[in-house]
């Protein structure tokens, strides 16, 4: 943003560059909370504030402490007797140094014979330079730890493996020791970004990728030395019975036994983030994080190949076409698709006394959906049973030695949490839509809302597979919304949002439209809950969809006159939580930039924000600007391509892709973030593209832009939920933007280099080398030439004694906002230029602005023009 000021002194001008039914809004028959019949989540260790914890562990035979591996480079020792005395006993932030993507401190494990062997084993990433390469490395090492005070001496570190890994994803991440053999096991990912799938996997004679290793850290005399490799520091041995010792072929192809990674125990993994042993059976259970469709639970056995990248679960992929004739893979024990969850986390087996019904069950998590499952290894074919749902980002489980409780940690949580029995509070929602009372029963199928349920509209809808949507909101009596011009709104408990979906059986024929689904989102203490109602075939009512959700297929005639089958997702409870996040604002499209438009119903013809304010939606303290952010539709040719793309990203991506989000991504989809600061242009993708070196956005090349690939591909498409149909309008828009306009978006340093080179003193931000009254940063924002005085932004003024006429250029792809002050330079108000246009506009082409302002000889007014980048 850049401000160009105009001060008016009289006529002189100076120009300067869960409890009860019916307690939610509108008297709707909905519970304040959905009842959890068995379990709930509460905080524990409230005195302790973790920093992105990934894993929890305990020392064998020592119940004084729980340890938490924190991704930001520390090991937190939690004192169970006195949590306030907890401390960090490892702090290696400076060694790890780079925490982008999935890098960081990933795992730790005590020697199984601790304290007789007082060692702690670490797995973390570092930045280094060796003959292997410059950049990221995966390091497995050992340090000594004092068994009495549990303090670590990092000077005792012994390195085992130091593998070059230039890409910041798919490092894998769990060290564990076999309960029967005492050997160290560690899962390595494929290296990520597509390169891993193409080059690092399905081979046993190259590097440490896509495999589970098994090594002897005690260096027993009967075991073998590892084959030479630049990543291997030795200091360990190879168990004689490792499956690839002496191997001369793999997948039907010959290999040199002297080059084989004899450390490998099993292969064919994408990203084995978490794995755990069953202490009873000795089975190793591994969750392999999926690609486009499936999450896998595998029982890892010696010498087996688990398929990646030729297979994702039991689905063949299109990533490689070189599957050798000798390839045989092991199917997962259980797999679930991405309508259920995304990023599987294997927990640990439960033997506590607190929940006897869970005895012997393996606890499991889903990172993105926040689901806790109980899995019975003896009935693996049945899959797990859901116990509870929580926030996204859960990463591990620990059994509390004090009472047998189940403790959670989460990468983005500021607290540790615990599973408890529910108190039976909360209710169950009505089974039929008509029983909720949101719509007039005399006109029910037409969905005429009752008086306190108000229709509203938004600027840019989330893509919903050709469906048409109507939206409604109800606010609790006497409650108000916390308003923000460009941030999240804060909603009172009991607020209800309703979204109704209709679909055309013949696309383009409104007469073929039918009711499909009606969804509710209810604000509750600490979050929201969602409900889905499926309309019956005779369109008389809609029935509650189970919490597991539903996928149906409908016969549709498409725009080409062809009969096609279209899938539709009726979301599960977990699906609701995946998108309706706290950092996304809960109700994703209920914020200023989306609602800043003409309203519906009794607000027809009025600006929706102003109408809501008059209706009492916002408190008296709300500071509502007269000119506010707004979003542009994909087909609005009057708006710049950049603003339309940023509007699309805000509507479809920003709920996850932002600094507070739990997804592993390096870019910011929020409209409020400047495009040049959003890490999109030449941004590094966490998950690689289709080609080597692809950026998030490669100006001029959609095919080398991961953003374009993600929204246009069938497999691994984004957004990942609730869509089976391509959004062709968005695909075309993003393609046009990458081809035609993205190259214009530059950092100041890139702009400076273009005009001055890097070392020219005239290139300072505050310099004005062409003496036109605009410094270099002004010219950068305005798009003018800093070396040409005739290429500048001018404010032309004139007066007839009664009014002041201002003329200035609104540059293409920039918004200009005229502001006035009564004399206080710290207080400015936007001047509304057009009665029915309160939104900031980023025009596709430059526009001349003319403003006539009355002159008042009795008071002075100051004016300035604010220039806003998209």
Image (cartoon, rainbow, N blue to C red):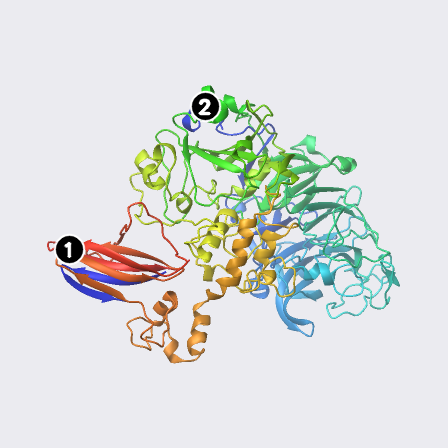
Query: Badge 1 is on which residue?
Result: 855
Depth order, front residue of 449/66: 449
CA separation in Å, label 2 and label 1: 56 Å
Observer-nearest residue: 161 or 335? Answer: 335
Using the image as rendered, state which of residue 213 and residue 675 is in the foreground.
Answer: 675
Determine the secondary structure under disc 1: loop
* Residue 289 on image: x %, y %: 68, 50
Callout 2: SS: loop
For residue 36, above or below residue 658: above
Query: Can I make out residue 356 in this image?
Result: yes
Q: Is residue 567 above or below residue 117?
A: above
Is 647 situated left or right of 97 in this image? left
Q: Residues within 10 Å of mark 2 (few under 14, many from 20)?
A: some
Of the 4 image quadrants, the one containing the N terminus is bottom left
**Foreground residue, 440 or 228?**
440
Quadrant for the C terminus, please: bottom left
Q: Which comes sooner in the sequence, label 2 or label 1?
A: 2
Residue 632 location in percent, x, y?
A: 43, 50
Q: Position of residue 845 (x, y in %)?
A: 39, 60
Q: Disc 2 marks which residue?
A: 22
| In the displayed structure image, the side of residue 584 where residue 92 appears, left or right | right
């Amino acid at each position: 943003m850049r401000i160009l000021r105009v001060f008016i002194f009289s006529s002189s001008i100076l120009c300067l560059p869960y409890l009860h039914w019916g307690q939610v809004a509108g008297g709707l028959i909905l519970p304040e909370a959905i009842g959890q019949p068995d379990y709930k989540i509460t905080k524990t260790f409230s005195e302790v504030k973790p920093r992105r914890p990934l894993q929890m562990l305990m020392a064998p035979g020592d119940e004084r402490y729980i340890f938490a591996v924190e991704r930001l480079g520390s090991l937190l020792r939690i004192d169970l007797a006195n949590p306030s005395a907890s401390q960090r006993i490892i702090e290696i932030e400076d060694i790890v140094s780079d925490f982008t993507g999935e890098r960081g401190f990933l795992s730790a494990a005590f020697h199984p014979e601790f304290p007789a062997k007082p060692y702690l084993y670490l797995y973390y990433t570092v930045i280094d330079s060796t003959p292997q390469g410059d950049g990221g490395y995966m390091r497995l090492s050992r340090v000594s730890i004092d068994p009495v005070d549990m303090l670590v001496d990092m000077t005792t570190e012994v390195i085992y493996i130091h593998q070059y890994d230039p890409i910041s994803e798919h490092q894998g991440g769990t060290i564990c020791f076999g309960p029967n053999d005492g050997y160290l096991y560690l899962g390595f990912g494929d290296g990520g970004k597509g390169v891993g799938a193409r080059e690092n996997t399905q081979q046993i004679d190259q590097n440490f990728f896509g495999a589970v290793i098994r090594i002897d850290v005690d260096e027993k005399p009967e075991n073998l030395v590892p084959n030479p490799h630049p990543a291997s520091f030795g200091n360990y041995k190879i168990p004689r019975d490792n499956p690839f010792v002496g191997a001369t072929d793999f997948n039907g192809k010959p290999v040199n036994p002297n080059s084989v990674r004899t450390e490998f125990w099993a292969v064919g993994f994408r990203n084995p983030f978490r794995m755990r042993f069953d202490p009873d059976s000795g089975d190793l259970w591994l969750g392999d994080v999926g690609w486009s469709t499936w999450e896998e639970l595998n029982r890892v056995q010696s010498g087996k190949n688990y398929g990646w990248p030729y297979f994702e679960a039991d689905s063949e992929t299109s990533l490689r076409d070189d599957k050798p004739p000798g390839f045989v893979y092991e199917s997962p024990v259980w797999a679930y698709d991405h309508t259920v969850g995304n990023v599987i986390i294997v927990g640990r087996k439960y033997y506590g006394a607190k929940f006897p019904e869970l005895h012997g069950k393996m606890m499991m998590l889903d990172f993105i959906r926040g689901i806790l499952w109980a899995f019975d290894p003896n009935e693996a074919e049945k899959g797990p049973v859901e116990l509870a749902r929580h926030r996204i980002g859960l990463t591990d489980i620990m059994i509390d030695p004090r009472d047998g409780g189940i403790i959670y940690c989460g990468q983005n949580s500021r607290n540790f949490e615990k599973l408890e029995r529910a108190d039976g509070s909360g209710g169950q929602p009505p089974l039929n839509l008509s029983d909720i009372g949101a719509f007039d029963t005399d006109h029910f199928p037409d969905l005429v809302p009752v008086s306190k349920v108000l229709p509203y509209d938004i600027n840019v809808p989330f893509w919903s597979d050709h469906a048409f949507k109507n939206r409604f909101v109800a606010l609790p009596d006497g409650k108000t919304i916390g308003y923000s011009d460009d941030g999240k709104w804060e909603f009172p408990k009991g607020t209800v949002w309703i979204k109704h979906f209709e679909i055309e059986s013949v696309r383009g024929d409104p007469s073929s439209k039918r009711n499909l689904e009606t969804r509710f989102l209810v604000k509750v203490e600490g979050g929201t809950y969602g409900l889905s109602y499926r309309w019956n075939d005779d369109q008389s009512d809609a029935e509650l969809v189970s919490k597991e959700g539903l996928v149906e297929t409908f016969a549709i005639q498409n725009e080409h006159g062809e009969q096609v089958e279209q899938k539709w997702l009726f979301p599960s409870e977990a699906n609701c939580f995946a998108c309706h996040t706290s950092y996304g604002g809960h109700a994703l499209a209920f914020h200023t930039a989306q609602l800043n438009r003409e309203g519906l119903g009794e607000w027809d013809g009025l600006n929706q924000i102003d109408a809501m304010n008059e209706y009492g939606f916002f408190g008296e303290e709300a500071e509502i600007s007269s000119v506010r952010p707004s979003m542009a539709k994909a087909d609005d040719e009057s708006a710049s391509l950049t603003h339309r793309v940023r509007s699309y990203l805000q509507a479809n991506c920003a709920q996850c892709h932002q600094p507070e989000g739990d997804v592993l991504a390096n870019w910011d989809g929020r409209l409020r973030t400047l495009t040049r600061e959003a890490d999109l242009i030449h941004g590094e993708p966490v998950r690689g593209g289709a080609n080597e070196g692809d950026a998030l956005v490669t100006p001029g090349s959609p095919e080398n832009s991961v953003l374009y690939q993600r929204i246009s591909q069938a497999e691994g498409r984004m957004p990942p939920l609730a869509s089976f149909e391509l959004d062709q309008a968005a695909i075309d828009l993003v393609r046009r933007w990458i081809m035609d306009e993205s190259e214009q978006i530059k950092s100041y340093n890139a702009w400076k280099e273009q005009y001055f080179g890097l070392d020219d003193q005239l290139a300072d931000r505050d310099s004005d080398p062409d003496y036109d009254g605009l410094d270099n940063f002004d010219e950068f924002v305005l798009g003018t030439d800093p070396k040409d005085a005739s290429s500048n932004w001018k404010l032309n003024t004139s007066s007839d004694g009664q009014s002041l006429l201002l003329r200035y250029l609104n540059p293409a792809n920039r918004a200009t906002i005229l502001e006035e002050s009564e004399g206080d330079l710290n207080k400015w108000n936007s001047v509304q230029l057009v009665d029915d246009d309160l939104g900031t506009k980023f025009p596709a082409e430059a526009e001349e602005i003319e403003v006539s302002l009355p002159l008042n000889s009795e008071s002075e007014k100051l004016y300035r023009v604010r220039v806003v980048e998209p």
